[in-house]
Image (spheres, rainbow, N blue to C red):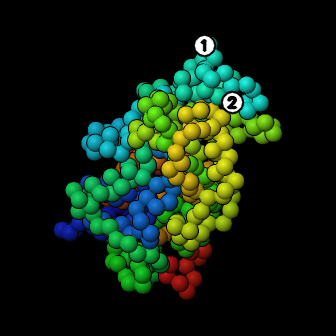
Amino acid sequence: MAETSEGLTSTSDPQHVVICGAGVIGSCTAYYLAKRGARVTVVEKTAAACAASGKAGGFLALDWCDGGPLGNLARASFQLHAQLADELDGASYGYRKVDTLSVSIDESARASGRPSAGSSAPEWVTGPAKSAKPIGSTKTTAQVHPELFTKKVLSVAVEKYGAKFMIGEAQELNVELDGLVPRVKGLFVDGELIEADSVVISMGPWSATNKLVSALTTISPLKAHSIVLRPKPEAAITPHALFLTYRTKEGVTMDPEIYPRPTGEVYVCGMSEETTLPSVADQIFPKKQSIAMLQRVAATVSSHLGDAEMVTEQACFLPCSEDSLPVIGKLPNVEGAYVATGHSCWGILNAPATGAALAELITDGVSNTVNLKAFDPARFSKPVSAYFGKSTA
């Protein structure tokens, strides 16, 4: 059964939805809402795709979430990515289908300079790879450049469907408390009220700075590090995504990931930690030790990567929910308030289905793209008194 909500009241004028956050979730939600005829304003404090949406790997998998609540969301979103690539020129934002391998690397083993006989590893894996097994094909795995993808869907929402994008700090919701049920009337941005029929909180780990969200549940930040390399020659690196089981010579086991991109660059990630979330995205800086470890991994896996130019050293924060499932839907006890966060490492994959389903829920009162019941914020529901004291947000 599909997720239901009150939906937008039909009037002669398009209903106004304000979206807080111009990451991949907010941008996809804006795209699908604007495409459905809603009047959309996206509010972003720093810049579009300035946080995890601009620094993620962009790996997409059809069936890796099967067997759990995320399965249907992931499958629907994988298909929507393919549709969007057809509609929006996927090549312009690095969409392509890839083969994906699981590769075991042991630093203590001797590198042969080429994959062992019978191995599925590509020729550019010159390090001590003990085994390489296919875990995804061009039918089941793909990739995008997350920053380019996010900016593309947002730009189409603005330029083709009339959405508005503005830089400003999303502050308190303006909530009317006079009726039987509190109702959103707008959002304060930099101290000024923007009137709205609905507001969507989609600010990644910063979603927890909203009082309605923080009163409902905990969104924890997980800091993730990555590097972007440019090998020479670029053509030596084939489109194979690698998921590593990596053992250092000190005996530490890690799970780094390597994603070659059609831009000729190679993305490497795998070092994460729990630490304090800065108030703004441009105050996030990588740890030198984590970057050095990723460089070491890259050089061990492939001589092509060891000699590559360092393009970017970066870090971002992933939004993690209490039960490891996204929080998508109407906030309980407050009409017109919605949230979409907590996607953890699958935010880029699941953004299109999240945006499409949320757009349906807001405009029609029911989501048909995917059943959102497992992700309903009401699973954390508390009495209305937990949300409102003297404050209206």
Say which quadrant the N terminus sits in: top left
User: Can you name the residue that lies furthest to the left here?
Assistant: 12
- The reply, left or right, for residue 6 in relation to residue 205 is left
Identified at 23% across, 62% down, the residue is: 162
User: How many labels were placed on the picture?
Assistant: 2
Residue 118 marker: 1
Q: Residue 47: x and y, percent?
A: 41, 65
Nearer to us in this view, 302 or 167: 302
Q: Quadrant of residue 246?
A: top right
Q: Residue furthest right?
A: 250
- Residue sitting at x 64%, y 45%: 294
Give the CA separation, mark 1 to mark 2: 16 Å
**Residue 216 visible in the displayed image:** no
Does 362 appear above or below 370? below
The kind of residue on which mark 2 rests is: Ile
| Residue placed most toward the observer, 36 or 386 | 36
CA neighbours of label 1 inside 10 A, class few (<14), some (14 to 19), many (20+):
few
With respect to residue 302, does 152 lie above or below?
below
Of the two numbered discs 1 and 2 on the same chain, state the one appearing first in sequence. Answer: 2
Residue ID at (73%, 30%): 106
Residue bearing mark 2: 105
x and y percentages locating residue 358 in the rendered image: 40, 55
Q: Amino acid at mark 1?
A: Gly
Position of residue 293 measured from the top left corner of the image (x, y, whole percent)? 68, 46
CA neighbours of label 2 inside 10 A, class few (<14), some (14 to 19), many (20+)? many
Q: Nearer the viewer, residue 175 or 127?
A: 127
Secondary structure type for disc 2: strand
